Image (cartoon, rainbow, N blue to C red):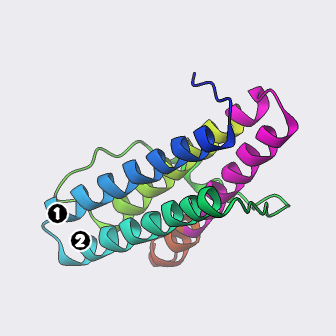
Amino acid sequence: MNTFNTIDEILDFAMEGEQGAVDLYTRLANNSTNTEIRDTFIQFAKEEMGHKAKLLKIKTEGIFESRPGMVTDMKISDFMSDIVPSPNMDYREALILAMSNEKAAFNLYSRLSQEAPSTELKNIFASLAQEEARHKLRFELEYDEFVLRDN
């Protein structure tokens, strides 16, 4: 488990996570044989780049605004099998993979929030967890709209 002593260390860690997501989605886009899925992964990568930019802005400007409140969890991904990334993934599989990644990030930040040594660090991790929950909800809504309603 990582330990953090400063807000900059937290933000660097979070930015590394966002970059990891950018790299994953970019790699999946480049390897996809389906144009629609490739475009979807490119969009996911762009969104993760935006999240990283937001964290960098917080770090450089020193302005951190938490967005209070809990995000609805549709729990769609709780009933999904893990997806192994492949060049032939369909849109359903791409959404499941994205939900799984966001859920993992949410769980990480939630755990770090519980273990943080100060209220300020707890609040930052809790806010980052809620941001990941919002990302997951977006993918769950997309899954509900384009996958579940077609069945």
Residue at image mark 1: 30
Quarter of the image containing the C terminus?
bottom left
Residue 82 sits above or below residue 50 on the image: above
Q: Residue at x 87, y 38 (%)?
A: 119
Image quadrant in which you'd find residue 84 = top left
In contact (CB < 8 Å): disc 2 and disc 1:
yes
Specify whether residue 132 is painted magenta: yes
Q: Which residues are magenta?
A: 112-138
Q: Position of residue 57 (x, y in %)?
A: 59, 65
Q: Is residue 69 left or right of residue 95?
A: right
Residue at image mark 2: 38
Q: Residues within 10 Å of mark 1 (few under 14, many from 20)?
A: some
Mark toward the start of the polypeptide (2 vs 1): 1
Question: Of the residues tagged 2 and 1, which is closer to the observer?
Answer: 1
Q: Residues within 10 Å of mark 2 (few under 14, many from 20)?
A: many
- Closer to us: 39 or 145: 39
- Closer to us: 56 or 16: 56
Gap in angstroms between the C-alphas marked 2 and 1: 7 Å
Q: Residue at x 59, y 56 (%)?
A: 76
Q: Position of residue 34 (x, y in %)?
A: 17, 71
Q: Secondary structure under badge 2?
A: helix
